[in-house]
């Protein structure tokens, strides 16, 4: 099983020299690194051990300004190689790096007390003792990169530590956190990174998340050597044909489509080095991503991280929170939680009681990162899951609103939520256009029936005369039951009157090609305002349109069978 080992330790303590002594490769490749004699960016080298263990070494910078780079390098490693200068002993970044390793859950590794050639026996003993106290449980090996002393023992201890690392990453879906992107002539964009899980090979169709950019993988290399497929734990370079250099960046992840959610929020269980207050603004490091974030405390131990960019996480991932210094680690409990400040929910999710967190509908496919298969004890409709009690509440609430709705116009607006079309058929209501009613409900007038009848008679008696309607409820009822036709400005006309007026208009238009307002008024013997209201209604009904001072028929109304 290929594994990645990451260096750690204070600036100038000899990390890069030790990696070179072990692997033969100088991992400082930037000119500035050579000029200043310090590491600035991450360096990589392969290390084959005599027992066949193949390790990828990630060399990290020790400078306090580059701790965030160290975090990017240390995320995803399996083993640590903590380097302590025999003459100097542990210094600030020795402690900070060690704390970060702890927060990342990296338990196995070796301590190298280096530059052994440069100190006397007693000083060396003191440094070894300090190493043992600092990292109980790890082998502490005195070495010299200069003379090569101790390197054999260091290799053996690395092999022994590698044996303790649990496997299992190979079975998970592919996820490669990108740490470098560059362009090679003739090849195009190349991305490198450590393969966290799964495998990657020529022709694989992946997504660069969080952007969701589809990519097709070409020519996979492990430490500059072409391979057919690379496995979890390996240091990988892949060509991405057709992808622009700036479409992918450090912090992105190449993943199997749909296997990991991209999310602006993470629910985490915190391990604090310093108290992290509610609302604190921090940098959240996950994989090679480094994202400004706000901490929303959910209680003693749990928090929701609100991120300024999406990240691609899964349950069990480790996050490092930093301000000026390293503040805390977080174990991801929910990689794509809803926006909430609900400790109970987070506690349930942490315990794996996912079904208990489901009330209103959530998409089933949004849960697959929290559990295998389907949650038990919840209702399902289409792609949605929700609780029985939520559905009962919905039925009750809609029922109540329908019952108190206007009896003349029964029903309530159909809920517009995305689940509506899947969930509403489960309820005993009837959908009529944009309304939801009790099955079989019709408009009824109740106690106002005599009043409505009287109004209806008045309108019928009025014939072609337009009436002002001042009772909105009655008007709507009479309209809904086909007794009147509404005109503009709060006016209406009885259905019979409307039909006579319309027929007169249609007859004239068909005979002469159009009708003026004056002609229409004269033919009906009504006032100018009433005539005006009527022709406006004809316009609205799509029967007529204006043409100079006349109304002419719209095409749909020119044929007699179109009359309604
Ligand atoms: N005498 C002696 N000097 C060493 C040994 N290892 C490293 N050095 C010297 O220590 C200095 C720092 O070594 P580096 O390997 O660059 O240290 P580093 O930990 O990688 O430093 P950063 O990456 O900047 O944190 C260099 O001048 C090395 O020559 C050693 O085993 N013996
Ligand atoms: Mg270095």
Image (cartoon, grey):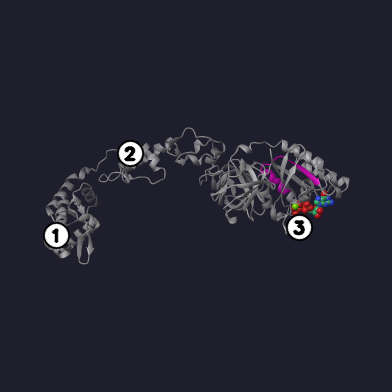
State how far apart marks 3 and 2 are (Cα).
Answer: 76 Å
The image shows residue 37, relative to residue 399, as above or below, that is below
Residue 80 placed where, x, y %? Answer: 72, 43
Residue 553: image quadrant is: bottom left
Q: Residue 414 or 19: which is nearer the viewer?
A: 19
Whether residue 237 is visible here, answered yes or no, is yes
Residue 198 placed where, x, y %? Answer: 61, 40
Pointer 2: what residue?
429
Q: Residue 276 or 362: which is nearer the viewer?
A: 362
Indicate left or right for 472 with 17 as reference.
Answer: left
Indicate left or right for 321 with 154 as reference.
Answer: left
Residue 94 placed where, x, y %? Answer: 74, 48
Specify the segment rendered in magenta: 95-113
At x 74%, y 57%, the residue is 33
At x 66%, y 36%, the residue is 167
Q: Name the N-terminal-most of marks 1 and 3.
A: 3
Which numbered dot is residue 34?
3
Q: Residue furthest bottom?
A: 548
Residue 300 placed where, x, y %? Answer: 59, 43
Q: Residues within 10 Å of mark 2 (few under 14, many from 20)?
A: many
State how far apart marks 2 and 1 are (Cα).
Answer: 50 Å
Q: Residue 244 or 259: which is nearer the viewer?
A: 244
Pointer 1: what residue?
511
Q: Residues within 10 Å of mark 1 (few under 14, many from 20)?
A: few
């Amino acid at each position: 099983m290929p594994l990645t080992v990451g260096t750690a330790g204070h600036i100038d303590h000899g990390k890069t020299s030790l990696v070179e002594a072990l692997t033969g490769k100088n991992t400082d490749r930037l000119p500035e690194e050579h000029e200043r004699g310090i590491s600035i960016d991450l360096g990589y080298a392969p290390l084959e051990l005599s027992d066949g263990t193949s390790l990828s070494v990630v060399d990290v910078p020790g400078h306090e300004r580059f701790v965030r780079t160290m975090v990017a390098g240390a995320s995803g490693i399996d083993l640590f190689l903590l380097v302590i200068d025999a003459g100097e002993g542990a210094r600030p970044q020795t402690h900070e790096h060690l704390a970060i390793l702890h927060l990342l859950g990296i338990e196995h590794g070796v301590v190298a007390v280096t530059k052994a050639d440069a100190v006397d026996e007693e000083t060396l003993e003191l440094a070894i003792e300090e190493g043992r106290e600092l990292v109980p449980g790890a082998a502490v090996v005195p070495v010299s990169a200069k003379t090569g002393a101790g390197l054999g023992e260091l290799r053996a201890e690395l092999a022994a530590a590698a044996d303790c690392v649990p496997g299992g990453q190979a079975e998970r879906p592919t996820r490669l956190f990108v740490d470098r992107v560059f362009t090679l002539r003739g090849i195009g964009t190349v991305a490198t990174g450590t393969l966290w899980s799964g495998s990657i090979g020529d022709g694989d169709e992946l997504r660069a998340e969080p952007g969701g950019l589809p990519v097709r993988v070409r020519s996979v290399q492990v430490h500059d050597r072409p391979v057919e497929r690379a496995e979890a734990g390996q240091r990988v370079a892949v060509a991405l044909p057709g992808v622009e250099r700036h479409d992918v960046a450090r912090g992105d992840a190449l993943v199997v489509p749909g296997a990991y959610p991209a999310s602006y929020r993470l629910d985490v269980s915190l391990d604090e080095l310093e108290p992290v207050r509610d609302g604190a603004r921090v940098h959240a490091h996950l994989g090679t991503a480094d994202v400004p974030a706000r901490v929303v405390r959910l209680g003693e131990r749990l928090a929701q991280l609100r991120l300024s960019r999406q990240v691609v996480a899964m349950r069990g991932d480790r996050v490092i929170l930093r301000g000026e210094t390293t503040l805390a680690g977080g174990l991801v409990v929910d990689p794509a939680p809803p926006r909430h400040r609900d400790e109970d929910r987070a506690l349930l999710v942490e315990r794996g009681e996912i079904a208990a967190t489901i009330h209103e509908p959530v998409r089933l496919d949004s849960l697959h990162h929290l559990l295998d298969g389907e949650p038990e004890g919840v209702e399902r409709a289409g792609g949605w899951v929700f609780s029985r009690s939520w559905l009962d509440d919905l039925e009750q609430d809609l029922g109540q609103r329908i019952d108190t709705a206007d009896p003349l116009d029964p029903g309530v607006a159909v809920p517009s939520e995305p689940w509506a079309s899947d969930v509403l058929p489960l309820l005993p209501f009837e959908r009529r256009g944009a309304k939801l009613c009790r099955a079989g409900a019709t408009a009824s007038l109740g106690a106002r029936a005599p009043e409505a009848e009287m109004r209806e008679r008045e309108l019928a008696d009025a014939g072609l005369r337009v009436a002002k309607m001042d009772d909105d409820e009655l008007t709507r009822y009479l309209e809904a039951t086909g007794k009147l036709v509404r005109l503009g400005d709060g006016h209406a006309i009885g259905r019979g009157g409307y039909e006579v007026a319309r027929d007169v208009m249609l007859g004239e238009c068909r005979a002469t090609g159009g009708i003026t307002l004056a002609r229409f008024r004269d033919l009906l013997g009504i006032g100018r305002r009433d005539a005006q209201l009527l022709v406006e209604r004809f316009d609205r009904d799509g029967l007529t349109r204006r043409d100079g001072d006349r109304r002419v028929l719209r095409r749909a109304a020119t044929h007699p069978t179109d009359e309604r």
